[in-house]
Amino acid sequence: MAEPVAPVAIIMGSQSDWETMRHAAETLALLGIAHEAHIVSAHRTPQRLYDFAGSARDRGVKVVIAGAGGAAHLPGMAAALTPLPVLGVPVESKALKGMDSLLSIVQMPGGIPVGTLAIGRAGAINAALLAAAILALGDPAVADALDDWRRRQTAAVAEHPKDE
Ligand SMILES: Nc1c(C(=O)O)ncn1[C@@H]1O[C@H](COP(=O)(O)O)[C@@H](O)[C@H]1O
């Protein structure tokens, strides 16, 4: 039997990125959106990247979330190899606190866009929410889940601060 299609693929340059990228996976799960997750590196596993990005659209993937740190070429290379929307998450690096990751993901040359999110956990969560918003354009169930998520977020914010 064929594997069910996951509309979102999360890729990351290393196992060490999972600590950040799992927040994207968890957010998608909260929204009831199936995802697949792969370690794919433009530098260390280039053929895996070609195979992944070359087949993603035909396999039914709709949005790619790509997280990488340091010289973060993965999101840009993935975007070069697939017409799908690619959302880039700069993973915080030890040496430069993720500024290197951010700049190497955000500064794409005109013609090959990567939608770049914030550095680290917030970026991973927002990548999942943005992927959901893209899917919601054509999927009322996802639109409802996203509305519900926002309602719950709003309800969880107290009107007044408490003493610690
Ligand atoms: N930026 C890239 C790419 C790539 O862009 O292809 N492949 C791995 N890496 C990054 O190297 C960092 C350190 O990786 P290790 O922890 O494995 O040494 C990770 O944040 C990964 O995303």
Image (cartoon, grey):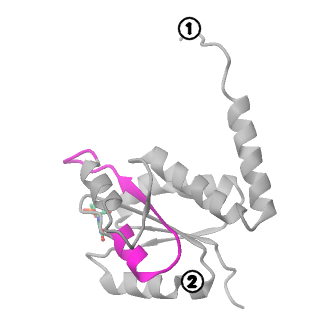
**Count of marks overlaid on the render:** 2
**Residue 104 visible in the shown view:** yes
Q: Quadrant of the N terminus?
A: bottom right
Residue with the mark numbered 1: 163
Determine whether 128 is above or below 66 in the image.
Answer: above
Asked whether mark 2 lies closer than 8 Å to ligand 1, one says no
* Residue range of the region highlighted in magenta in the rendering: 74-97
Say whether residue 114 is left or right of residue 55.
Answer: left
Q: Which SS class for mark 2?
A: helix
Q: Is residue 85 magenta?
A: yes
Q: Badge 1: how crowded within 10 Å, few (<14), some, or many (20+)?
A: few
**Residue 33 visible in the shown view:** no
Residue at x 80% of width, y 62% of height:
140
> Looking at this rendering, what residue extends furthest in the bottom direction?
1
Disc marking residue 57 = 2
Q: Residue 164 or 158: which is nearer the viewer?
A: 158
Asked whether mark 1 lies closer than 8 Å to ligand 1, one says no
> Looking at this rendering, what residue extends furthest in the front direction?
110
Residue at x 30% of width, y 60% of height:
107
Quarter of image, ligand 1: bottom left
Determine whether 99 is above or below 40 in the image.
Answer: above
Circle nearer the N terminus (2, 1): 2
> Looking at this rendering, what residue extends furthest in the left direction?
95
The type of residue carrying mark 1 is Asp
Disc marking residue 107 = none
Residue 51 location, x and y as percent?
43, 88
Residue at x 42% of width, y 47% of height:
118
Q: Badge 2: how crowded within 10 Å, few (<14), some, or many (20+)?
A: some
